[in-house]
Amino acid sequence: MFEHDIDDLKDKGLLRRILDRQGSGEGEAFPSATRIKIGDVEYINFSSNDYLGLASSPALAAAAIDSLEKFPFGAGASRLLSGGTELHRSLEEKIASFKGTQSALLFNSGYHANIGSIPALAGEGDVIFSDELNHASIIDGCRLSSARRIIYRHRDMEHLASLLESVEGARKLVITDTVFSMDGDIAPVDKVVSLCSKSPDTLLFLDDAHGTGVLGNGRGALAHFNMKPESWIIQMGTLSKALGSFGAFIAASRDITDWLTNTSRGLIYSTALPSCVVAACNAAIDIVENNAALTDKLWRNQKRAVAGIKMAGFEIVSDETPIIAVLVGDINATAALAQELKQRGIYAPAIRPPTVKNARIRVTVSAAHTDEDIDALVSAFKESNTSED
Ligand SMILES: *Cc1c(COP(=O)(O)O)cnc(C)c1O
């Protein structure tokens, strides 16, 4: 049925395949946070969003195993049909206290949280203002909403201000990624908050998927900008990236979470997270709250990688976060460089259209990388660059 379409993708160099990693074999060490084995070859992994190395933390695994002695593996039903457990409730309380909000509500993934909440927060007669580089799950959430959508230029506060002023008498919802997932730059959250605070009847939705566990000592973008939660600010965060587990949350005022509990279809019509996943999330937040050294290490690695890649002669989109987008040229040049890195033991894949407008190698750095890992990354870039001239 789709043969021609697939051939077309192939011709354009855009056909993607899923590559699954192998597990560690018998007698090998506990799953590594920084190594990935594909097709029997081991690489240093620079493609994961596991920014703190928690995905392979024995503490998370132990919490998950422990929970299975008290609760079933599967939740069996949605939260509203009592699929949740005491662990779900305590995780929500922990997240609310971590984020300094009145309340928090769990979702099955960041994708669910966005497509489930955005239509519940903005509907008929309302207006959504969305950054042009917002994540696909936000775009899909906006598509599912009956609200009018207005796209503002990437991080352009003058544009956002003039658009907000141009709309009167409607409820407004401003939505932005805090860390843009493909460019790695940070939204000017302080300025967005200030604009929203001056605009009547305006809610702000922050997608902190890559800020959670990374910015503001792990507390996210608002904390990074030294700002406090407000009743009109909705902070979405994922448990699947820096927190090393799975799922997502919305931290907000009690009114907002009560409203979402009653109207968010992604929450109401989907089975609750398994308790073992929730138990691991609980352990992850404890670790982030009590180990500032972990986020410090992440940022030290980030600086080492950014400096090295620049020294190797490459242009990067932004040096602000552990997401380092390296611009190499067109799709073919980018794919070729990714292949060269791979031959040098570095796994940092090319990201191509339609995920991004311009192809790039997306390097993500973790606290779990050693100095030697980062240096190997930098050498691989350096060698690939000279071999190209
Ligand atoms: C990854 C991501 C999501 C989706 O989160 P999942 O938990 O992986 O579904 C949402 N928003 C942004 C900005 C992301 O990067």
Image (cartoon, rainbow, N blue to C red):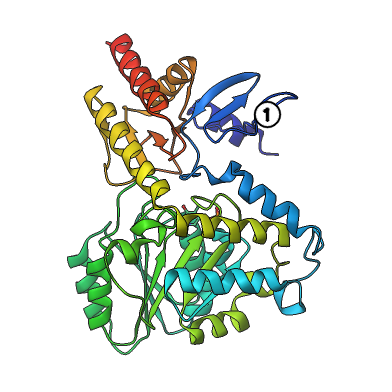
Ligand 1 closer than 8 Å to label 1 CB: no
Single out the residue that lies furthest toward the bottom.
169
Would residue 308 be visible to someone looking at this image? yes
Secondary structure found at label 1: loop
Q: Is 231 left, or right, of 316 in this rendering?
A: right
Q: Where in the figure is residue 83, as x and y percent of width and height?
A: 76, 72
Residue occupying image coordinates x 41% and y 82%: 126
Quarter of the image where one finds residue 131: bottom left
Which quadrant does the C terminus fall into? Answer: top left
Relative to 108, does residue 349 appear above or below in the rendering?
above
Q: Is 253 left, or right, of 71 in this rendering?
A: left
Could you say which is closer to the camera, residue 332 or residue 195?
Answer: 195
Single out the residue that lies furthest toward the left.
158
Could you say which is closer to the camera, residue 131 or residue 95?
Answer: 95
How many labels, in total? 1
Question: Are there few (<14), some (14-19), or many (20+) residues within 10 Å of tag 1?
Answer: few
Residue occupying image coordinates x 27% and y 27%: 308
Q: Is 12 left, or right, of 377 in this rendering?
A: right
Would residue 357 be visible to someone looking at this image? no
**Disc 1 marks which amino acid?**
Gln
Relative to 50, does residue 91 appear above or below in the rendering?
below
Residue occupying image coordinates x 55% and y 84%: 259
Residue at numbered disc 1: 22
Q: Where in the figure is residue 346, as x and y percent of width and height?
A: 46, 23
Q: Where in the figure is residue 110, as x and y percent of width and height?
A: 54, 60
Quarter of the image where one finds residue 1: top right
Residue occupying image coordinates x 35% and y 86%: 170
Q: Where in the figure is residue 373, as x and y percent of width and height?
A: 42, 26
